[in-house]
Amino acid sequence: MDENSIPLKKPVSFYTAALEAFDEPNYLMELMAKRFDAHSAVFWKRHRHTQDEFEAEGIFNRPALESMKQDHRAYFVLGEENVIFREDTKDDKVITGRAGKPPFDKKWLEKDYTKDLVALGIKYVASCPIATEKGTPFGAVSLYFDQEVELGDTFKSAFSDRCEFLYAMFTLLGGQYHRFITDQSKLIHEILSQAESLTTTLKRIRKAAPHLGASTVDGLDILGDASKAIRLIKSLANARRFQIALANGKHNATFTDIWDAFNSIMQPRIRSTKKDAVALQSIRSNTDDKLFVRLAPSHLNNILANLCDNAIKYCKPGGYITPSLTVLEDGTLRFAISNPSKGIPEKERDLIWQPHFRGRLERSSSVEGQGLGLNIVADICRLYHANYGYTEKDSNNATLRVSTFWIEFPSNIVRRVDRYKY
């Protein structure tokens, strides 16, 4: 088994598994324990309000401590007797020892948060303080062993590397996003553009993860292209955190003229493309009425922006993009956008709405993307009970297809207004 692999159902890189489960601290501690063959593991995180308390944020295989956590009693205080962590953690070397002997002596074993260790048969303990860039405590990871184990320099180096990686990952995927998520108008494609402040954190990940095989995590070039690494790592977090912003934004829904909204998004994009690259045809509609849809402005903008970007990226050079609005018999409003393209293989058409999916033709093309745009559209549509889909048909050119993405807004969020009385 690879040095970085952990014994789960199938061998998997610790770093890969951690990135995919960055917001599940209990599972992260399970990964840490299994990586080092430990009986149990705890991630202690500094309380952001009291500053001198460390709470058990992630727990694996410590049932008594888990019960204490539910009662908000799973914590220790810096400076109290027999606490092994210090205020100044610039010297963040791993602390190891036998249970019952200094620094993990009998008084330490009598603490509320350690009383269960004797019953669990713990023989050795290893703790790694985690410091911020300023040297102040951020947290710590503790491993507990119920068997004889060698805790020498090799172990300490590997343990320290993974703790450093966890801290960099928490910083990258956690705190950096809070200020964006609390602003309901900022959704995923805007968050993805905020990369400047993450450079330092990426360097920490590089430093902490020197054993990533061919410098990759699932194809992520951590040690190479920094900007690509930032984009791809961030997308792991955004796919989940987007759901929070999505649900919070719905109460801001207002009626918006969908044709005006489409034009305000598409026209600047068309003008910014190379001359004669693509062209926009006049909208096709089966009514003269002005048509409004009731969505949060940011949600409508996300739908239209992603569909417009998609059409421009994959339209045949010199081709026409054709938007259409159709009011169906039951009052449903169907918005569609069509363009000539190479098409999508039939077996991939149901997959294009999934996060990070890029089809065979797309992967072989020069078009860049993260496979998130259509997933964003799908998420928003589901929130408003709108149907969505993709169809294609033959074109006049035997090598091209006419691709159409469509959204059907239900009648309860559609308003028709006589254009001449508006």
Image: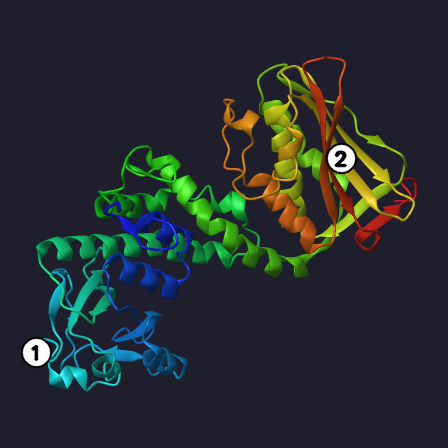
Which residue bears the numbered disc 2?
Answer: 336
Q: In front: 309, or 164?
A: 164
Category of crowding for the residue at label 1, using alpha-carbon neighbours closer than 10 angstroms: few (below 14), some (14–19), many (at least 20): few
Residue at 26 percent across and 57 percent down: it is 35
- Residue neighbourhood size for the residue with mark 2, other residues' Cα within 10 Å, grouped as few (<14), some (14–19), many (≥20): many
Q: Which mark is residue 101?
A: 1
Front residue of 164/251: it is 164
Q: Nearer the viewer's eye, disc 1 or disc 2?
A: 1
Q: As drawn, is 2 to the left or to the right of 408?
A: left
Pick whichever of labels 1 and 2 is earlier in the sequence: 1
Q: Amino acid at mark 2?
A: Ala
Q: Position of residue 95 (x, y in %)?
A: 12, 66
Which mark is drawn over residue 61? none
Label 1 secondary element? loop
In-front residue for pair 19/177: 19
Q: What x and y, as percent, mark residue 71? A: 40, 84
